[in-house]
Image (cartoon, rainbow, N blue to C red):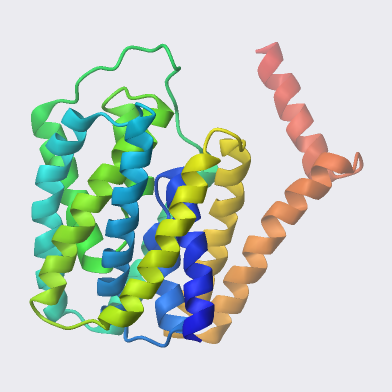
């Protein structure tokens, strides 16, 4: 199972390199359900894996001029405080509760990915983020990351785009620097209360770093919208699996079924003229145009 874990860890790195996030969303379930780690140990290990991989990805993006270091330092400083505090808080939270919270973060992340996010054009001006708001948001995101090991890139990237006015390429690169800071701060909080298997962590980290290098290389060659939506549906499936494992198998089966049903129905209605939902959408479009 360690070999399978290491092989799948490459996908973690590819996700970080391509999307600027998603590492912990994949790493924690991988370590819990494939490698068989305890929930808290898996979260701590994932923080190491994602932190090192993010450093590699950030410098790769920096060479292409896609990292705003001032914003990264400003945002990351406050989020590190939250991340370390979150790691400390885990001593009072059961492992099963952490996994349920992790699944909830996965669902929120997937919905945000499927809804999309506003991006600024390549030539748009880069405005500076308000200091107080930046510190507050960084602290909150860091607390989430340090506690459940998730909520990094897919929350940081929209914040950088919407509040900081960064372009999407710059937001992805900058988010990796922030994720690295968050991850290492959260890991420090965890290591004060537990130990991890450094040998397994090193192997998984090396595989993820290799994947990140591949992801960064192809970041400009793959349609980001298609990739984002596909990954969003995948994260929903993974969240259903985690909830099924931690709560009840029926919850997992229902979640997976609904996750598969929605995109399948949308695909069918886009290709079948007799689909009633398609006719309803067409009527809504005509009405909106007339008004």
211 vs 280, nearest the viewer = 211
Residue found 42% across the figure and 62% down from its top: 208
In the figure, residue 271 lies in which quadrant? Answer: top right
Residue found 27% across the figure and 65% down from its top: 47
Residue 115 makes an appearance in the image: yes
Residue found 18% across the figure and 79% down from its top: 93
Horizontal arrangement in the rendering, residue 287 relative to residue 178 (left or right) = right
Q: Locate residue 138, reporting x and y percent.
A: 17, 44
In the figure, residue 218 lies in which quadrant? Answer: top right
Residue 112 makes an appearance in the image: no
Indicate whether 46 appears above or below 173: below
Residue found 53% across the figure and 72% down from its top: 7
Check the picture and name the quadrant holding the C terminus: top right
Q: Locate residue 128, reporting x and y percent.
A: 19, 21
Indicate whether 291 appears above or below 202: above
Q: Locate residue 60, reporting x and y percent.
A: 37, 40
């Amino acid at each position: 199972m360690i070999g399978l874990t290491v092989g799948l860890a490459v996908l973690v790195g590819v996700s970080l390199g391509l999307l600027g996030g998603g590492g912990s969303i994949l790493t924690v379930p991988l370590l819990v359900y494939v490698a068989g780690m305890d929930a808290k140990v898996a979260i701590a290990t994932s923080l190491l894996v994602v932190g090192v991989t993010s450093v590699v990805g950030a410098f790769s993006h920096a060479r292409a001029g896609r990292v705003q270091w001032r914003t990264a330092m400003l945002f990351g400083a406050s989020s590190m405080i939250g991340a370390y505090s979150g790691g400390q808080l885990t001593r009072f939270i059961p492992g099963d509760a952490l996994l349920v919270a992790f699944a909830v973060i996965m669902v929120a992340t997937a919905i945000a990915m499927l809804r999309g996010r506003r991006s600024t054009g390549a030539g748009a001006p880069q405005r500076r983020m308000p200091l107080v708001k930046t510190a507050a948001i960084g602290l909150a995101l860091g607390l989430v990351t340090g506690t459940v090991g998730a909520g990094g890139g897919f929350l940081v990237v929209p914040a950088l785009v919407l509040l900081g006015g960064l372009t999407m390429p710059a937001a992805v690169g900058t988010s990796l620097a922030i994720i690295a800071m968050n991850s290492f701060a959260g890991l420090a909080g965890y290591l004060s209360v537990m130990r991890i298997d450094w040998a397994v962590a090193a192997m998984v980290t090396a595989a993820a770093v290799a994947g990140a290098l591949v992801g960064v290389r192809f970041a400009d060659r793959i349609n980001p919208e298609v990739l984002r939506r596909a990954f969003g549906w995948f994260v929903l499936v993974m969240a259903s699996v985690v909830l099924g494992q931690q709560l009840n198998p029926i919850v997992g089966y229902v979640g997976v079924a609904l996750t598969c049903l929605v995109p399948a129905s949308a695909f069918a209605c886009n290709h079948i003229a007799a689909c009633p939902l398609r006719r309803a959408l067409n009527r809504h479009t005509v009405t909106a145009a007339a008004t």
